[in-house]
Amino acid sequence: MHTATRLAAQLLPTLRKLNPAAHLCGYGLYAPMNTEYLRTLGVSTVLGGEFEEGLVHLANRLDHSASKNGMSGVSQPEPRISLARQKFIPADRQGLAPLAKYAHVILPSAEHRVAGYTEASRGCKHLCRHCPIVPVYQGVFRIVDREVVLADLRQQVAAGAQHITFGDPDFFNGTGHALAVVETLQKEFPRLTYDVTIKIEHLLKHRQHLAMLRDTGCLFVTSAVESVDDEVLRRLDKGHTRADFLEVNGIFRELGLALQPTFVPFTPWTTLNSYLELLHVLRENELVENVAPIQLAIRLLIPAGSRLLELEEVRRLVGSFDPSALVYPWRNPDPRVDALGEEIEALVATSEKLKRPRRAIFERIWNAAHEAAGLEAEFAAQPTLVSRAAIPYLNEPWYC
């Protein structure tokens, strides 16, 4: 999405020089949201949503083109955004690097497990204002046929996968489909573990299914909590409250499931006090080890097409769209908050390189935030937190 598109933008001029006749196609969520900018970089075809049929059509069109001119096709015949239902086929993973080269899961025992990845569904039923899926899918989600998902998983297990990350935007958009997949998976591969991403709203609504996730090998659930400030959650249209988040955390502790919350702590509405409150909530609820430190440095992105622009207050505070950064820039009314965000981002980057444990990084964040607010930190006097060894985690955290 955002990072990939910015990397591609840096690469495209070089590709153009290497082969001026090449037909360049950009596809994915950020492609249709940034069509105009991609066109200026020489991208001829832009595809979003359910893009596979468009890619096949493009390949056939170029194969049968008389001119095969890479700069032709600016007025592409393929739909820029397609939400049409497709008949999926199992993924062809030949030629990819071995799975061991990708992310892996670290268990409480310190065992490292090779991780695979698949999607049982795409798109999302929900319309969270800050989510980049929404401008493309507009509340639509599409199921990937169960047998196609299972065929993909079988080939990944054969290739060495010991754990699977389901990359669905929300695994419980279609609960019947999702549970049928993991139930079959557990029967075929009882030692295989997995993780999923599910909204707080769905975790409450479908709490009766959480034990089944645990019993079929789910190690942890990622959930985009985003904030513990109900006013910010209302602006983001997240569909949950701070109390809902804490209730879910209690349910997970009772079940013995690990919850991995993600956050967008730096927004135009963040204050030094609200940031400190987030840190206090994580400590008081023994969630420090559940949160990847980078999640405490994330800054709100407002991309093209964002539903946040529906809010008049957001339209007033943002600057003109910056195509090279792919966002509408904004500044916090309190410059100390922006300065703290930059400090914490640098602190996390340095600490991760030094492989400091999460508790140690959190303490540094705690101290920096209190210093920014002119307060005493008093971190050491707080209660002992859950041991890091009790929390399974991916060594490459999601930015959810």
Image (cartoon, rainbow, N blue to C red):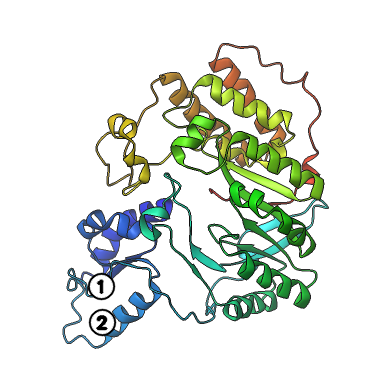
Is the residue 122 above or below the residue 129 in the image?
Answer: below
Q: Is residue 41 visible?
A: yes
- Amino acid marked by disc 2: Leu
- Residue 98 image point, x, y percent: 61, 71
- Residue 283 image point, x, y percent: 71, 29
- Amino acid marked by disc 1: His
Relative horizontal placement of residue 316, taking residue 29 as reference (left or right): left
Q: Residue at x 49, y 79 (%)?
A: 88
State the quadrant of the N terminus: bottom left
Say the numbered circle drawn on residue 62: 2
Task: Kindly identify which residue carries mark 1.
Answer: 23
**Mark 2 closeness class: few <14, some 14–19, many ≥20 residues within 10 Å:** some
Which of the 4 image quarters holds residue 35?
bottom left
Q: Residue at x 53, y 57 (%)?
A: 169
Which of the 4 image quarters holds residue 60?
bottom left
Closer-to-camera residue (22/369): 369
Which of the 4 image quarters holds residue 26?
bottom left
Relative horizontal placement of residue 325, taking residue 356 as reference (left or right): left
Is the residue 306 above or below the residue 142 in the image?
Answer: above
Q: How far apart are the alpha carbons under marks 2 and 1?
A: 8 Å
Closer-to-camera residue (356/48): 48
Instruction: Name the secondary structure under disc 2.
Output: helix
